[in-house]
Structure formats: structure tokens, C-alpha cells
Amino acid sequence: MRADRLVSLLLLLQNRGRTTARELARELEVSVRTVHRDVEALGAAGVPVRADRGPAGGYRLVEGYRTRLTGLTTGEAASLFLAGMPGPAAELGLGAELATAQLKVRAALPDELGGRAGRVQERFHLDAPAWFREADPVPFLARAAEAVWEQRVLRAHYERWGGRVRRELRPLGLVLKGGIWYLVAQARAEGQGQEQEQTRARVEGRAAVGEARTYRVSRFLELEPTGVSFERPADFDLAAYWQESARRLEERLRHDVAVLRLSPRARRLLPMRFGSAGVRALAAAGPPDEDGWVRVEMDVEAEPVAVGDLLALGAEAEVLGPPGLREAVARTVTALAGRYGATAETGTGTGTGTETGPGPGPETDTETGQGPGAEGDMAADTEAEADAEGGGAVAEG
């Protein structure tokens, strides 16, 4: 561990120039006293480190000195694929490796390219979680990642939509979607052979053994390694699997079409509330009437979900059809009016003016283009939604 720290110290001095002991201690997560000892160790090894005194002082390398000690370890090389995602890298247990790998890459670059890399890091930042969503607690993420890498079978206790289940998992990959981690794995019920599980899967109409399924990592109650190895399918492509399963999920969930009448303000809100479905609806909208309202047709989820989603638009939208959805929205609005005692005569409640409905939200000052009710949130609970619809290739059955 000390050898790794000395390399990191040397690369920090090379990349940053004069740096105080306190800054180095903070970066290396050690005490200032340890930094002083490590600098002495570098000097004893022949590295020309100089200590400048005074308010503008600090440690620096002699001008012109550059180390060629930039070989990456296995963990550091793997972490480079997460170079734009320090948060997820830390969740996977690769935070320290990523920091060291970046230092080594910077040290190996010519001065001009190294400076450009530093400016990119200063000017671009990735924040994975969606707005108003805290990151899921994922205590088993590092264990899942290790099993993916080592191709080891896991014994899982999982909280799915329909209850708790126990599974033996062959982990194939991890996916970070909208700040939420998912494990893609082949699975079978604990204690069952493959033939039994295949039969059970056919009866229940869900994915059979050998087909990949998706698990939300935060829903694992237990995740224990078995020590048993497995052969990863040679033809499995994680990116292609995820793209196809996400497409199938959206098709399965957004199987109804709502006919809406939207105010000018609702037209601005629709893409932020409904993502690509709202964008497509607006693109095919008819011309505005004399009040500026337009008629659109938009893909929506099943009625219970669609009612809540559409009510987020408040009085800025009217559901014209289908009749069942319009009646469901009307029942909900009537129940809300009764609960809050809202009547037109007393003027209580929210009223029906064009300035009612959802507040401006984050789009007024962040230009995110996606609010808390956007399509990204719809897809955030892949396993739960798919399980509610009867399972499928993307869901744990």
C-alpha cells in the first residue's frame, strides 16, 4: 500500500507542480506527518523533491524532472472505463484506482495534451441520478461487480414486485440507468434443477433458465457468493441486451393512447413530464385553436398509472379519450375536490385558471429538459414494472 501511495505522491507533484503538504495529505487521505515521511522516502530513492518555505511554499519536483513510472495495474486499467463517473466508480469500489489511473495517464501525456485533459476534467461533469431522486442504497454492489468480473454464481434473496424470492444467479453485467444500478443475470429458483425451472417458467409465462433477466441492485436483501464458477455465454452482448429489453419494456408499458387537449403551458411541460412520448405527441399535434390549445395523441401506461401521470399537468390539460381514461381522471378529480372541499362557488381549491397546475419545477432555472415525472423515471424500476405486467425477458420472474 505504501508503494502505491509513493507513486501517487510522485505523480501528483509531477502533474500539479508545487503543492502543499496539507493539500497532498487531503488528496492521499493520510496525515500531514505521513506526507513528510513519504517525501523523505522519495528523496532517499533518488527522486529530486524540493521543499519551498514561506506562505507560497510547498513540495515540488526539480524543474525538468519527469518520471516514466506510469504502468497501470489491472484495477486501474479497468477503472478508466469509468473515468467520467467518479461517483459510480466509488460505488463499485474503484474510486482509488480511478484516481491513480488518471494521474498515471496525465503523467504519460505530453505537456500540451496533459493540460488539455486537465481542462476537460475541470469543465465537464457527469451527475448520473435524475432530478429529485437520491441514489439507491446499494450495499451489495461491490459484491455483484466482483461476481460479474470473476464469473461466480451468487445466491440471492430478492424483493420483487410480487414478493420475496430466492434465486441462484449467474451475473452477466451491471448497468447504471438514471442513477440506478441493475444486475443482468441468468437465474433459477434456489434448490431447483434446470429442467424443473424450465417447466415452471413455461407455466408462469416468464423467462426461462438461460435467458437474461434484470434485477434492481438496491432490492437485494442478501447476496452471497457460492464459490462456483460458470461459463459466460460467448454470444451475450450486454449493451445489445439492455437496448432491446428497454425497448420491449416501453412497448409493454406504453400500450394505450390518450387523446389530450393541452394549453400552451402544458405543451411546454409535456416533454419534461413524459420524455420521448411527449416529444412524439407534440410533433404530430394539430394546429392550435383560438385559445392556443392543441389536440394530441400520446402513448401512456396502463390506466391506473396514466391517471396519476396526466393529473401532474393539472388544469393545463383535458383528457378527451379514451372514455374509460377520461372517466377515471374525472373520478379522481371529483374525489380530490370532495376531500379538499373545493367548489367553484366558494373559490377554494386550485380553481381552473390557466396558471394552475404543476409549478415551474427545475426546468425554469436548470434547463434540464427532464422533470421528475419524465420517462426516465418510468424506466427506473424495470423489474417491478415488468413483473406487474406478467414478467418477460427483462424481468426477474
Image (spheres, rainbow, N blue to C red):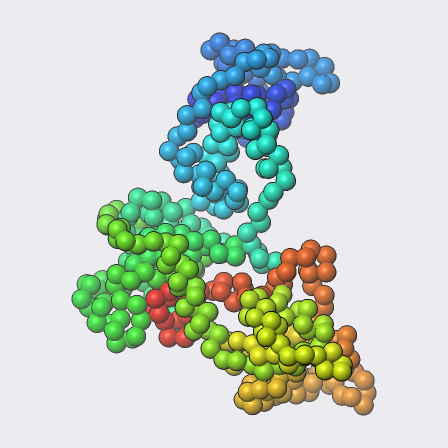
**Residue 17's x, y, as percent?**
61, 21
* Residue pictured at 42% horizontal, 56% vertical: 182
Query: Can you see residue 382?
Result: yes
Q: Extreme front residue here?
A: 287
- Compared with 231, 392 (above or below) is below
Specify whether residue 143 is in view.
no
Where is residue 385, by image quadrant? bottom left
The N terminus sits in image quarter: top left
Against 58, is 194 above or below?
below
The answer to whether residue 300 is left or right of residue 172 is right
Measuring from the top left, give residue 12's x and y in whole percent. 55, 24
The residue at the point 43 percent across, 66 percent down is 247
Left or right: residue 54 compared with residue 17: right
User: Foreground residue, 217 or 46?
Assistant: 46
Q: Residue at x 49, y 62 (%)?
A: 380
Q: Position of residue 382 (x, y in %)?
A: 44, 65
Instruction: Quadrant for the C terminus, please.
Output: bottom left
Q: How many marks?
A: 0
Which residue is found at the position 68% from the left and 79% from the top? 287
Q: Nearer the viewer, residue 221 or 266?
A: 266
Picture quarter containing residue 326? bottom right
Q: Which residue sits furthest right?
A: 346
In the figure, residue 59 lies in which quadrant?
A: top right
Q: Position of residue 181 (x, y in %)?
A: 46, 54
